[in-house]
Amino acid sequence: MTTARRVEVPTPLGPAVVQVRRPVRALGTVVLTHGASGRVDGRDVLAVRDGLVAQGWAVALVHQAWGVAGRRTPPRPDPQDEAWLPVLAALTTGRGRLPAPWVVAGKSNGARVACRTAHLVGADAVLCLSFPLHPPGKPGTSRAHELREPLAHGIPVHVVQGTRDPFGTPEEVRAELPDPDVVSSVPGEHTVKDTGALVAACAEFLAGLVRASS
């Protein structure tokens, strides 16, 4: 049995909207958010949500405040992060508190937010879908420092990256991390159409977390 509820959270950028699906005796919680499109209905994001719920995880799918407001592009990192923090506080405290361990996750721009704030929200791990290591055609403009931020605080990170991602191939991402095994390579580009491979890679990482904590 899985319960579903909608949570609206006030933030400095306006309300964020969270759709929570929680199986009975959930293994933990994945807080998942979208990319720079501001849409939460991407086929890849929904596949990850549904696949992880089927594996026994509670999943909170977050429509960030700027996306709810209809903005076509995300704000600068600082205001975006400031609006993310109250969402995590609402999900991990109080009567509606979701079960630990808490994994913050996001696609592309959402992965950047998750990495930058993981240590501030008390995350147990970070799951990145299609991390945008650099803008297409501009490998010298690297965001690797954001990807490494959780590791500096002892928080494990896993990246699922498409083999032909113009924002950074799996090999490029591995070169920026101390352990190449924390990057899963799946067929596809920045939006991975092989959702089976995408979900399988995410589920394998989460299963490892469960094993490590047992």
Image (cartoon, rainbow, N blue to C red):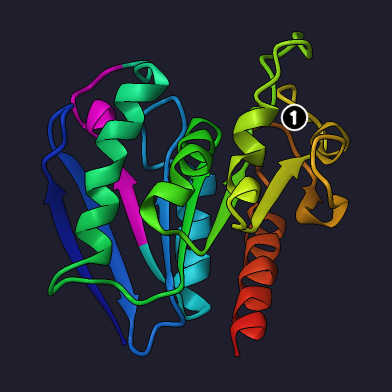
Residue 64 seen in render = no
**Going 24% across and 55% down the picture, which residue do you hit?**
89
Left or right: residue 25 versus residue 55 is left
Q: Is residue 44 above or below residue 76?
A: below
Q: Secondary structure at mark 1?
A: loop
Where's residue 68, x and y in %?
21, 32
* In-image side of 181 versus 145 (left or right): right
Q: In the figure, 120 relative to 54: above or below?
A: above
Q: Range of the magenta residues?
A: 60-71
Residue 209 visible in rendering: yes
Q: Amino acid at mark 1?
A: Asp
- For image coordinates 64% across by 37% down, the residue present is 147
Occupied quadrant, residue 4: bottom left
Which of 7 and 118 lies nearest the eye of the viewer?
A: 118
Q: Would you identify the image quadrant in which residue 28 lies?
A: bottom left
Q: Residue tagged by mark 1?
A: 165
Residue 176 vertical position relative to residue 186 in the rendered view, above or below? above
Q: Residue at x 13, y 30 (%)?
A: 14
